Image (cartoon, rainbow, N blue to C red):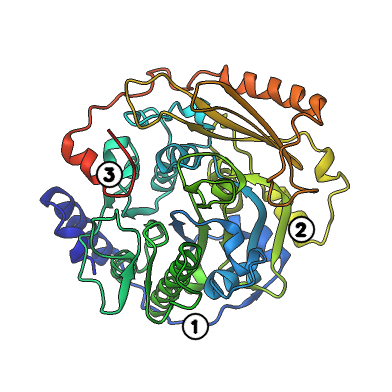
Amino acid sequence: MFEHLTQKNWPWGLAIAIVLVLFASQSVRIARPVDTLPIGDAEDVEALGTRDDLNVLFVLVDTLRSDRLGSYGYERDTSPVFDALAQGGIRFDRHLAQSSWTKCSMASLWTGFYPSGTGVTRLDHGLPDQAIMPAEVFQDAGFRTVGIWRNGWVSPTFGFAQGFDVYSRPVPAPVPAGVRRDNPTVQFGGSDLDVVASAAEFMSVAQDDRWFAYLHLMDVHEYTYSEETALFGSGQSDLYDNSIRYVNDAMGLLRQALIDTGNLDRTLIIIASDHGEAFRERGLEGHARAVYRESTETPFIVGLPFELEQGIVVSSRSFNVDLWPTIFDLLGLPELDEVDGVSRRPEILAAAHGETDSESEDTKNEIGYAHLDQTWGTATALPTPMVAVVEGRYRYIESTDSQGGPVVELFDSREDPKELKNLAVQQPDVVGRLHRELESYLGREPVWSEGVPSLKLDELELNQLRALGYSIP
């Protein structure tokens, strides 16, 4: 419940109390529970921007790779709630996160700039006050804004609280009996149920106010699951699937909260992730180590305030920097100025009307980037970027090996869907062209005139981040 938030510390508790009083004093609508959505069509999607009653629920499922969801073709039943949202809403089929490390990735997702533009690529970097955050756009449009998070990389320390009326980590409640957590490095208690309970309490008092809620879930990252969701085995990859099913069930509780508070048919639900997870596809495990397919291909699903008889699938490539430009365009809100991301509303409406793109994805020149500084966790080391340039069927990667030598890789997802065969030697023309794109990308300067803040983290903050499983000196 919301008391988990108020116990964090008194300033945030006071802020929450003030916001709740404001909500309660201004709320006159009696909740109208609706457990099924009305049927909508392409015209309803096109008209979303004309509605003045919509809320926005943004659920960031940390460490969720798209190919482990049924709606993205996975054979295991890991994600029925997520899949139902996709089936009646909008699903982006080929979506790229901008890093495999949370802070770098989230800085790009929130601002619409690639990592070379945000400059947030290392342990001590943060977003400056100059950054325009989506919560500020919602706030200016009259939305109440709340962020509830469980990952220290998105803490206020790093500039992620901008625009939120309330932004806090819930105090962990005792984990229910039968729940297991198989990431032995994790030291925090609690689970995503704390976030769901806090969000449900927020919805119950928000009533007639329009709101934007950001929920950052961590149970997939922490391999948390219950006896009921231990459906897929005991290997590391199986436990990961178990944890997705556990978070899926938490999403079911969140949907029920929308029903109970009369918000189901007036809320846009966004599902996304900051990065994926590797399971030794090429010898690596986990994330924040590379920018290969398994750690950067993530879901982007939009659940609508109505249900489409046939969900919309955007088959062209999209990127996390596109997320907020797309949502703002759908809702008729002001766009983010001069960002790298673009609105995918035209592709959504084209797919909704059954139109097909006459230009092959293989021939398009649209390019996206995933970026990881290989020495991000050591403040004194020289930057060593590993960058993926993704264009149509190709993923081109430049990195540095353990001896400091260059590594060049080229993968063709059409011929090699898992992108395991390096074709750099066989296709020098493609390598040369994408290498030039990469050089141009790395030549960019951060967009902030005031520069990228370099933060001094105390030992408590460092220990909290180490507790997430990251090796930080």
Three-letter amino acid code of the residue under disc 2: Ala
Three-letter amino acid code of the residue under disc 3: Arg
Q: Tell me, yes or no, if residue 458 can be seen here.
A: yes
Residue appearing at x 23%, y 57% in the figure: 188
Q: Position of residue 18 (x, y in %)?
A: 19, 56
Give the residue furthest to the right: 358
Q: Say whether disc 1 or disc 3 marks the residue closer to the N-terminus.
A: 1
Helix, strand or loop at disc 2? helix
Q: Position of residue 354 (x, y in %)?
A: 82, 62
Residue appearing at x 55%, y 60% in the figure: 51
Helix, strand or loop at disc 3? helix
Q: Quadrant of residue 363?
A: top right
Name the residue nearer the viewer: 363 or 21: 363
Helix, strand or loop at disc 1? loop
Alpha carbon separation for disc pair 1 and 2: 27 Å
Residue beneath disc 2: 351
Residue beneath disc 3: 466
Q: Position of residue 16 (x, y in %)?
A: 21, 56
Q: Position of residue 237 (x, y in %)?
A: 50, 63
> Residues at badges 3 and 2 in contact (C-beta under 8 Å)?
no
Residue 35: which disc? 1
Alpha carbon separation for disc pair 1 and 3: 42 Å
Q: Say whether disc 3 or disc 2 marks the residue closer to the N-terminus.
A: 2
Alpha carbon separation for disc pair 3 and 2: 44 Å
Name the residue nearer the viewer: 17 or 85: 85
Q: How many numbered circles are shown? A: 3
